[in-house]
Image (cartoon, rainbow, N blue to C red):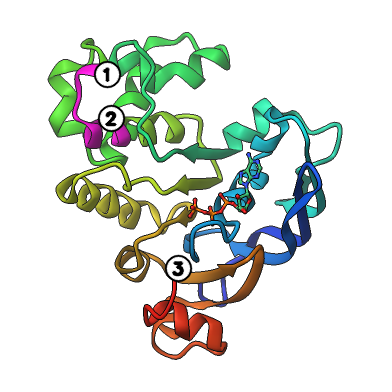
Amino acid sequence: MTDSHNKTILTTKDVRLWYGKKEALHGINLSFPDSGITALIGPSGSGKSTYLRAINRMHDLVDGVTVTGSFDFNGTDIYAPTTDTVDLRKRIGMVFQQPNPFPFSIYENVVFGLRLAGVKDKAILDEAVETTLRQASVWDEVKDDLNKSALGLSGGQQQRVSIARVLATSPELLLLDEPTSALDPVSSHNIEETMLKLRDDYAIIIVTHNMQQASRVSDRTAFFLDGNLIEVDKTKSIFLNPSMKETQDYVSGRFG
Ligand SMILES: Nc1ncnc2c1ncn2[C@@H]1O[C@H](COP(=O)(O)OP(=O)(O)OP(=O)(O)O)[C@@H](O)[C@H]1O
């Protein structure tokens, strides 16, 4: 939750980002508590995903992107040249719109990051598999099929296995980029239940187009428009009593 005893896990200041010469983020100042869910909402092209991807340096993989500003993650300067991005992405896990299991067994998907980190002890791996699949609310559905291919699962199950894979490396922050937009309503509901289960133990940032989803799951909501952060507040305030006219227009469906 986001009450006053929360510590801040991430502080971003004056974040600007250019795709080539085009400035897509115009100076975002936004901080996040160490637990609870923050939803990023706003019309298409407002910069939500661009901002989210900047947090774990996903833009490093794309030519021509320039990022400036400060990103303080629990004392780590995310963009310092000495920051190891592999380690960073373990600490800041990301779940994408399309479930993206590897073409391996369910078990091997979940332990992928642990194996990369050199963990070999089968008891530790087994325990991580059960714990994270339970956290991701998919254990009961897959426990008898751990050695079967993850590609044989439904989209919703694949997405929850992807969440377990991210949880297995003990992240401090989870980034979810429209995690339910490719899923049917029942699978989306399952993912929302999973998020609600995780919110006390993890800091979670979710980009969503679905305003009902933002209002159901998030503690705080940040409204983006044209590469600017218009306002951030408790989710109830954003939906019922926003400070800014642009937010009011968006949440009442007047545009976007
Ligand atoms: N790889 C890219 N190259 C050039 N411009 C890009 C790229 N990705 C995004 N943009 C531009 O940056 C701006 C912000 O896009 P972004 O995808 O972050 O918005 P968004 O709010 O997440 O939108 P959506 O809800 O549609 O995903 C848009 O003008 C978009 O066209």
Q: In the picture, residue 53 is in which quadrant?
A: top right
Q: Which residue is mark 1?
A: 150
User: Which residue is under mark 3?
Assistant: 1
Name the residue carrying label 2: 158
The answer to which quarter of the image holds residue 165 is top left
Which quarter of the rendered picture does the N terminus lie within?
bottom left
How far apart marks 3 and 2 lie (CA) works out to 27 Å
Instruction: Name the spot of residue 171 as percent of width and height, x first.
Output: 53, 39
On screen, residue 49 versus residue 131, left or right, reads: right
Pointer 1 and pointer 3: residues touching (CB < 8 Å)?
no
- Ligand 1 within 8 Å of the CB at mark 1: no
Disc 3 is placed on an element classified as: loop
Report the span colored magenta: 151-160
Q: Earlier in the sequence, mark 1 or mark 2?
A: 1
Instruction: Say few, some or many: other residues with alpha carbon within 10 Å of mark 2 (under 14 / 14 to 19 / 20 or more).
Output: many
The answer for how far apart the CA atoms under marks 1 and 2 are is 7 Å
State left or right for residue 233 relative to residue 56.
left
Could you tell me which residue is drawn at 25 percent across and 12 percent down? Answer: 149
What is the distance, in whole Å, between disc 1 and disc 3 at their CAs?
Answer: 33 Å
Q: Quadrant of residue 78?
A: top right
Q: Give the percent coordinates (x, y) of residue 22.
A: 76, 50
> How far across and how far down the image is residue 150, in percent?
27, 18
Q: Residues within 10 Å of mark 3 (few under 14, many from 20)?
A: some
Name which residue type carries label 2. Gln
What amino acid type should be assigned to the residue bearing mark 1?
Ala
Q: Earlier in the sequence, mark 1 or mark 3?
A: 3
Is 256 above or below relative to 193? below
Q: Which residue is at the front of the view, 32 or 221?
A: 221
